[in-house]
Amino acid sequence: MTPGNGARTPPEWQSPPSGWQLYPPGYQSYPPSRRSRRPLVIALSGIAVIAIVGIVVAMVLNNGDAQTKAGTGSAQEVVKDYLDALANGDADAALNLGIAQPASRKYVTADMLEKQLKNWPITNIVVTQDKTLESANTALVHASADFGDKHSQAAIPVQKVDGRWKLKSATVSVDTMAQISPGGPAATLSVLGEPLGKDDHFDAFPGYLGITSTIPYLDVLSSPLLLDSLTAADVGSVLTFDFTLNNAGHDAVNKALETWIIGCLASDPSSYRCPPWDPGMPFDTSTVQINGPIDLSKVTQSLLPTTTRVVVAGTATYQVTANEIDGGPAVFNSVQPISTAVDLTAHPPVVAGPS
């Protein structure tokens, strides 16, 4: 029926309200399902796992490739790589470029190398190869570098093993001679802050060693361990250590002498290992008082080279107030001969009797 004036449009022909949309028959609308995101999450997770695996594989392959390439360059390149590894603090890379390996890695770790570089950074590396000294499997590579403010140069021996060039040794084996005098100052050495103990040798990279004594009263002097030390790869190096008594040591020895003198005058002499004293008059030891400081300016101190004892000899001058036996107080001056030794290993150092 065609609508005319006043006719009403059937309900099914009415226009939909504003905001509504028409859909084809059979269409059903549902709220968004969370299941629809799962494939995307799974896909992204899979990509992440693949990426991580790829990175790990790449790292392993690169590391293996670096290990494989170690020593594959020329003799000159291998020495350059070795010095660069030291300068960059890469202890493992440096060790990998040497044939002989250290007996102990106590002093050739990354931490120890960091200590060395902190004190003496390695700079100005120059490497040249002397072709006239090269043979099929051996060569001498001339290298120079600055270790802190110390310039070093040497002809470093390298050798071809299984087709690859390597240094005969990436470390230096150092003999301390501690076995000769296990009770002497050589047994008190400390390397890079670590006590050496009774070991008679140690292995180290060339550079700063920070050698000190565990006895705070001793200073240690030794030649620096630089590139020339690598030339003795087959036999090791012997460092000569000179021990000297420092200012704190001199003061400690004088303090031990003062304690000893007062003890011998005022206490039981046997407990202080006292020699026969000649104070000039008999007195009551319980009343002894030292007037002022004891003058030890005429007493010499000598550190024995193979022991931790200091030999002292000379005369001590002091003034004493004490009660005479069967008398009153008296003051007397004494010049007392001194010939004994002070043990630096005691805390504090003490007079240990004649050496």
Image (tube, rainbow, N blue to C red):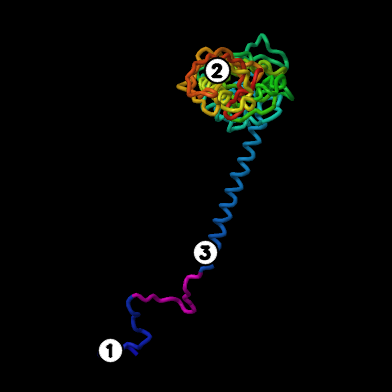
Residue 268 x %, y %: 61, 27
Residue 245 x %, y %: 56, 18
Q: What element carries label 2?
A: loop
Give the labeled residue for mark 1: 4
- Residue 50 in the image: above or below residue 183: below
Residue at horizontal 65 percent and vertical 19 percent from the top: 307
Question: From the image, which quarter does the N terminus lie in?
Answer: bottom left
- What amino acid type is highlighted by mark number 3? Arg
Residue at horizontal 43 percent and vertical 76 percent from the top: 23
Q: Magenta span covers which residues?
A: 19-33
- What amino acid type is highlighted by mark number 1? Gly
Residue 223 seen from this side: no
Nearer to us of marks 1 and 2 is 2
Q: Is residue 149 rendered to the left or right of residue 159?
A: left
Q: Find residue 292 and report its image quarter.
A: top left
- What amino acid type is highlighted by mark number 2? Met
Q: What element carries label 3?
A: helix
Give the labeled residue for mark 2: 281
Q: What element carries label 1?
A: loop
Q: Find residue 93 and report its image quarter.
A: top right
Residue at horizontal 61 percent and vertical 48 percent from the top: 53
Upstream in the sequence, badge 1 or badge 2? 1
Dominant secondary-structure state across the stretch colored magenta: loop
Question: From the image, which quarter does the C terminus lie in?
Answer: top right
Magenta-colored stretch includes residue 22: yes
Closer-to-camera residue (214/103): 214
Magenta-colored stretch includes residue 25: yes
Residue at horizontal 49 percent and vertical 21 percent from the top: 320
Upstream in the sequence, badge 1 or badge 3? 1
Give the labeled residue for mark 3: 37
Residue at the front extreme, as displayed: 326
